[in-house]
Image: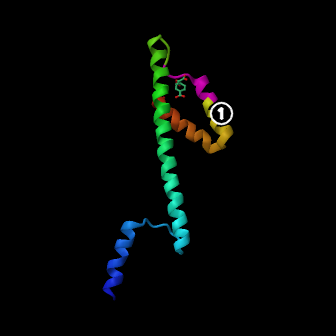
Amino acid sequence: MSTDTATAAPAAQATAPDTGASTQEAAGLISDARSRIDDLDGRIIGLVQERMAVSAVIQRERMASGGRRVNLAREMEILAHYRNQLGKPGTALAMTLLELSRGQV
Ligand SMILES: C=C(O[C@@H]1C=C(C(=O)O)C=C[C@H]1O)C(=O)O
């Protein structure tokens, strides 16, 4: 066994995450697209955190005025909105957002 091969493989893995591609061209394209996905995910997480903060303001105000934390009619509107835009998995996404925003009911 060549020592070159044994030492080169781990170094290559350390610098470039595995794309699963079998050509350099495809690997480059996948790496670039993954960077865009990482950027989008960072923005999505930021938006989710912003949503949680806005939701907390509403909940705090309603409870301070003697109301309940949860408003089911409003939640139904949100669930329908996500389902209409994204199909059935949109409902699960909206439920996760609601749980992040107001905790478990
Ligand atoms: C933010 C509100 O309060 C709660 C949280 C919601 C949300 O995070 O979207 C929706 C309904 C309520 O259960 C609201 O009534 O609008």
Q: Is residue 64 above or below residue 5?
A: above
Give the number of marks.
Answer: 1
With 94 as the anchor, is 7 left or right in this view?
A: left
In magenta segment, residue 64? no
Query: Picture quarter containing residue 82?
Result: top right
User: SS class of the residue under badge 1?
Assistant: helix
**Colour theme:** rainbow
| 86, 45: nearer the viewer | 45
Q: Is residue 58 above or below residue 11?
A: above
Name the dominant secondary structure of the magenta segment: helix
User: Label 1: few (<14), some or many (≥20) within 10 Å?
Assistant: some
Query: Over which residues does the magenta segment extend?
Result: 69-77
- Residue that mark 1 sits on: 80
The residue located at (52%, 36%) in the rendering is 97
The residue located at (47%, 45%) in the rendering is 42
Query: Picture quarter containing residue 85?
Result: top right
| 46, 104: nearer the viewer | 46
Query: Picture quarter containing residue 83?
Result: top right
Q: Measuring from the top left, give residue 81's x and y in whole percent.
A: 65, 34
- Quadrant showing the N terminus: bottom left
With 6 as the anchor, is 95 left or right in this view?
A: right
